[in-house]
Image: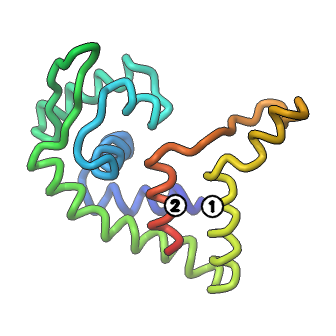
Amino acid sequence: MVRAAVIAETTAASGISEPELGVLVCLHESGGSLRQNALAAALGWDRTRLSHLLTRMTNRGYVARDKVPNGVEVALCPAGRHVIDATLPTLEMATRRHLLDRLGPDNAKTLKALIDRLLSGEGVVAEAKTGASNAGAKRGPATDTQRCFAADLIS
């Protein structure tokens, strides 16, 4: 419910879709450009889905794609930078209102500690050594996007 409220508020204010928001946030947090395969991995999307979205975003002037050795580089264009710069304050305020303000300071600190632990990959090494795991759990080191967003969210 919290995620849905944050995304609904953010996309309504920005005029972009949730997938477009994800791409712009990833590119923004990576310094403005990423290889297309790294972007797909960070978002957890298959390359075909991302390629179709990037074509639409290129047509809208949000991103540019350039062939580079062994791949494609995706970069934010000025229009994409403008959208993400205008959208981030709404995203942060919505996250605070729908999540952090409901928790209070002590619970927010606890949540930050839990997120830091999960994003650090703690427990992954222990599972590898013991062979124990949670069936179906998808865990491992966090992406830069996950770390950046979680840090911004809690701080």
What is the count of numbered marks? 2
Please give the residue where the numbered disc 1 appears in the rendered image.
116
Please give the residue where the numbered disc 2 appears in the rendered image.
150
Task: Please tell me which residue lies in front, 48 or 113.
Answer: 113
State the residue at coordinates (31%, 64%): 88
Contact? badges 1 and 2 (CB < 8 Å): yes
Q: Quadrant for residue 135, please give it.
A: top right
Q: Position of residue 155 (x, y in %)?
A: 49, 75
Q: Is residue 94 above or below residue 52?
A: below
Q: Is residue 77 above or below residue 138?
A: below
Q: CA distance from mark 1 to mark 2?
A: 8 Å
Q: Is residue 126 above or below residue 46?
A: below
Name the amino acid, label 1: Asp
State the residue at coordinates (40%, 74%): 93
Q: Secondary structure at mark 2?
A: helix
Label 1: how many residues lie within 10 Å, few (<14), some (14-19) or many (20+)?
Answer: some
Q: Position of residue 101 (x, y in %)?
A: 56, 81
Q: Position of residue 41 (x, y in %)?
A: 46, 30
Residue 131 horizontal side relative to residue 1, left or right: right
Name the amino acid, label 2: Ala
Q: Quadrant for residue 132, please give it.
A: top right
State the residue at coordinates (61%, 52%): 119
